[in-house]
Amino acid sequence: MNILALNASPRTGIESKTEIMLEHLTAGMREAGAAVEVVHLRDKRIEHCTGCFTCWTRTPGQCVLKDDMSAELLPKLQAADVAVYASPLYFHTVNARMACFRERTLPMVQPYFVQNAEGITYHPLRVPMPAEVLLSVCGFPDLSEFEALADFMARTRHPDVAHVADIFRTAAETMMNSFLHAKKEDILAATAQAGREIVTTMAVAPETMARITQPLIDTHLFSVMGNLFWKSCITEQLTPRAFRRRKCVPRPDSLETFMLIMPYGINARSVGKEAATLQFRFSGAVTGDCHFLIRDGSVGAKPGHRPDADITIETPFDTWMNILTGKADGQQLFLEQQYQVSGDLDLMLRLFAKSS
């Protein structure tokens, strides 16, 4: 089986979740014995269709435009058994690069009109076109975000072209957060499994698709953390790419958002099978108490005071947020007595040690 995978993402490497998903899908396809070629459309010169219809009249099947689409990509598409169309979601559909590619496949159909069994009119194929797989990612957490894209691809898919699968991944940026590592690995493993299944059965099993589309985090938590991320990017005047490269952390702006984010900064495994309680008492810009119960490798957050806490940290809110986001050295501020700690200091060092 010959597979042509077309990647329309303008990003590269870890910045491109489309590319990451596609790499795992095609790896699975190769493992199942398929010959796979991945083409990054960002590296190709593809002009916009001019609507001249030369490919239907003077030079049937040949586009008048002399670019990579005419010279390289159309012949490769015609030779493929399966085409994977991989595009990030832009304005609820494929991006402009992929849309342009789709438009330029016009030479593969004839100008005549025929009707199918349902009476729908279409142009007959000039040459066979490969079966289609659609892969896309988006930032939103809702699978319904892909409805317009799926409809666009269905409407632009020729009636005689087989549809194999739609592989969609929501909240793709969130998937890369370290605290979701286990889920990310399962999603990527399932994507590779989908590749193997496409080659062997020309379908993706429902249980495999369920793993690919599994929910990542609660929608409320997604919104809170996403808003903090963008607010922090704007405050620091950094693009998301620069923010991640500098290993910045979204800055909590309330007791609620602190309770949502702080658990991911605690090395819960350091406690082992024992239970420990960490108490915060805030003053300054934000006042209030909250505590974290660390047990069995997990961290639970609750508002209020816990008098029997193993560790109590009394601190101005902004001081601890500077520590949490890496703007200040926690040990240095402790020596300067800018915050106070009572209780098990050895346990505190373990809780805030980087998880291995």
Image (spheres, rainbow, N blue to C red):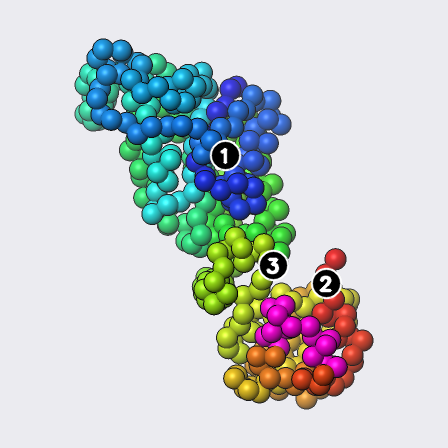
Check disc 1 and report the residue beneath it.
204
Mark before the other along the chain sequence, 1 or 2: 1
Query: Is there CB contact under 8 Å for labels 3 and 2?
Result: no
| Dot 2: element | loop
Separation of marks 1 and 3 at Cα, in angstroms? 37 Å
Q: Callout 1 environment at 10 Å: few (<14), some (14 to 19), or many (20+)?
A: many
Residue 177 in view here: no
Which residue is drawn at the image coordinates 30% and 29% (left, top)? 48
Q: Callout 3 environment at 10 Å: few (<14), some (14 to 19), or many (20+)?
A: few
Numbered disc in front, either 1 or 2: 2
Residue 143 in view here: yes
Q: Which residues are magenta?
A: 320-335
Check disc 2 and report the residue beneath it.
354
| Dot 3: element | loop
Q: Callout 2 environment at 10 Å: few (<14), some (14 to 19), or many (20+)?
A: few
Query: Is residue 325 part of the magenta span, yes or no?
Result: yes
Separation of marks 1 and 2 at Cα, in angstroms? 39 Å
Say what amino acid the circle numbered 3 marks: Lys
Query: Is there CB contact under 8 Å for labels 1 and 2?
Result: no
Q: Whole-percent x and y of residue 296?
A: 71, 66
| Dot 1: element | loop
Where on the picture, by quarter, is residue 68? top left
Q: In the image, 61: left or right of 17?
A: left
Query: Is residue 221 part of the magenta span, yes or no?
Result: no
Say what amino acid the circle numbered 1 marks: Val
Q: Which mark is residue 276?
A: none
Separation of marks 3 and 2 at Cα, in angstroms? 14 Å
Numbered disc in front, either 1 or 3: 3
